[in-house]
Image: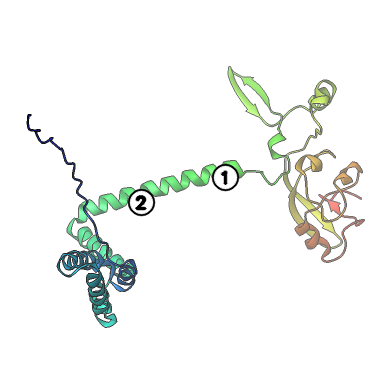
Amino acid sequence: MTKKQPANFIIHCSFYIIHYAPPRLADRLLRFFCAPHRLEEVQGDLHEEFAWQVERIGEQQARWRYWRDVVGFIKPFAVKRELNQYPKPTNTDMLRNYLKVAFRNLVKNKGYSAITIGGLSAGMAVAMLIGLWIYDELSYNTYHQHYDRIAQVMQHQTVNGHISSQESIPVPLDAELRAKYGTNFKHQAMAAYPGDRILSYGVKKMARPGNYMDAEMPEILSLHMLKGSRNGLKELNSILLSASTAQALFGNVDPIGKLINIEGRPM
């Protein structure tokens, strides 16, 4: 009879590392009272101390000691002193420092500073002039309601081989435009050259800029009427006055129905 050989057994052992975390409530209390710039350092030291105490005296006793260390560290007067130890610079201090540095650099390099500041000033002035010119071009006559649909008819003339454009057009062109292109335009009107006109009412006489125009011109220009209507020029002996001219001639009296003389012509 042979003796049984002992069987070979393979024993699998698993090792577990138990991590003991300090009390969460104590950590929250520490984060609330501790200065932000010291929190990481203080909390790291306390966690290392807690891990060492767990191995030495056990978890429960280490937790109590952790609480004691946190409460002992929280000293409002000491924490406040840490917070105020390095006061933050104010915006006024930083601005004053920048101005000092800039002034010293300007004094140190006077020639270079003069060229730089002069060139910058000239560039800014030119940019502002260009901006104002563009604004004036884009805003010209925009107070008219239909300014983007108002057009002025001009004519080209060739004199000695040179082509020139001008605002003056022959009167028969008005009838020609109405006959051939009348359906393309809602309103059409001719106007004379503007100039000073002598207006008189009683003993009052004054010169005011104005011109003669067709009855449809007030609608084209969308004039804002304080009294009367835009159709007033359809009457032969009618006139449209600006508010300032009416005030100068008639004062506070209603100008509707009043008779005035234009350029001394007999009434």
**Residue 103, position as x, y percentages in the image:** 24, 62
Dot 1: few (<14), some (14–19), or many (≥20) neighbours within 10 Å? Answer: few
Residue position for label 1: 136
On the picture, is 152 further left or further right than 258? left
Q: Is 50 located above or below residue 155 in the figure? A: below
**Residue 195, position as x, y percentages in the image:** 72, 45
The residue lying at 53 percent from left, 42 percent from top is 134
Dot 2: few (<14), some (14–19), or many (≥20) neighbours within 10 Å? Answer: few
Looking at marks 2 and 1 on the same chain, the residue that comes earlier in the sequence is marked by: 2
Mark drawn on residue 191: none
Residue 167, picture quadrant: top right
Depth check, front residue: 152 or 66: 66
Mark 2 touching mark 1, by CB under 8 A? no
Please state which amino acid type lies under the numbered disc 1: Asp
Q: CA distance from mark 2 to mark 1?
A: 22 Å
The residue lying at 80 percent from left, 54 percent from top is 199
Please state which amino acid type lies under the numbered disc 2: Ser
On the picture, is 236 further left or further right than 180? right
Residue position for label 2: 121
The residue lying at 87 percent from left, 65 percent from top is 253
**Residue 220, position as x, y percentages in the image:** 78, 39
Residue 87, picture quadrant: bottom left
